Amino acid sequence: MRIALLGAGLAVVAPLLCATTASATDYAPTCVTWKTDYWKSRIEVTNNCSTTQRVKLVIKFAGDGDCKVYAPGQRHDHYSISSRVDRLERC
């Protein structure tokens, strides 16, 4: 009986584990960088790549940034109550 319940539990959980793996975060390339100015609550994002990039900031303890298009060499400033960047993602 316990083996049957265990098998049924795995049948429910296994698709969820696979779905999580399939939807892994698509990080921005390392040539897109950010710099934090804590005094001004500003995050400067710069595209140092040779191609145009679409990225968004994922910020700890605050709302994430909007998806922005960065031409090569372009910089955008993002102002937030939290300047703690978790990561940059493609969008």
Image (spheres, rainbow, N blue to C red):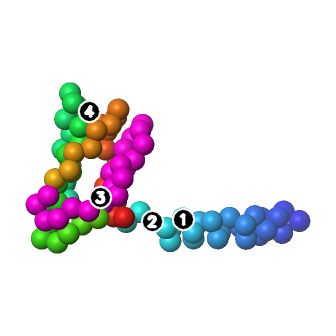
Label 1, label 2: how far apart the Cα atoms are:
7 Å
Camera-side mark, 3 or 1:
3
The earlier-in-sequence mark between 4 and 2 is 2
Q: CA distance from mark 4 to mark 2?
A: 29 Å
**Quadrant that contains the C terminus:** bottom left
Residue at 54%, 65% in the rendered image: 20
Q: CA distance from mark 4 to mark 3?
A: 19 Å
- Report crowding for label 4: few under 14, some 14 to 19, many 20 or more residues within 10 A (C-alpha): some
Cα separation between marks 3 and 1: 26 Å
Residue at 77%, 69% (x, y): give it: 7
Cα separation between marks 3 and 2: 21 Å
Q: Marks 1 and 4, Cα distance to the nearest angstrom?
A: 33 Å
Q: Residues in magenta?
A: 55-74
The three-letter code of the residue at mark 3 reads Lys
- The residue wearing badge 3 is 68
Identify residue type, mark 4: Ser
Where in the figure is residue 21, as x and y percent of width and height?
A: 50, 68
Which residue in the structure is indicated by mark 1?
Answer: 20
82, above or below 46, in the image: above
What residue lies at 21% left-to-right and 30% top-to-bottom? 40
Which residue is disc 4 drawn over? 41
Q: List x then y, in percent, for residue 6.
A: 77, 64
Q: Quadrant of residue 50?
A: bottom left
Q: Nearer the viewer, mark 3 or mark 2?
A: 3
- Check disc 2 and report the residue beneath it: 24
Q: Quadrant of residue 53?
A: bottom left
Label 2 near label 4: C-beta < 8 Å?
Answer: no
- Snapshot quadrant of residue 19: bottom right
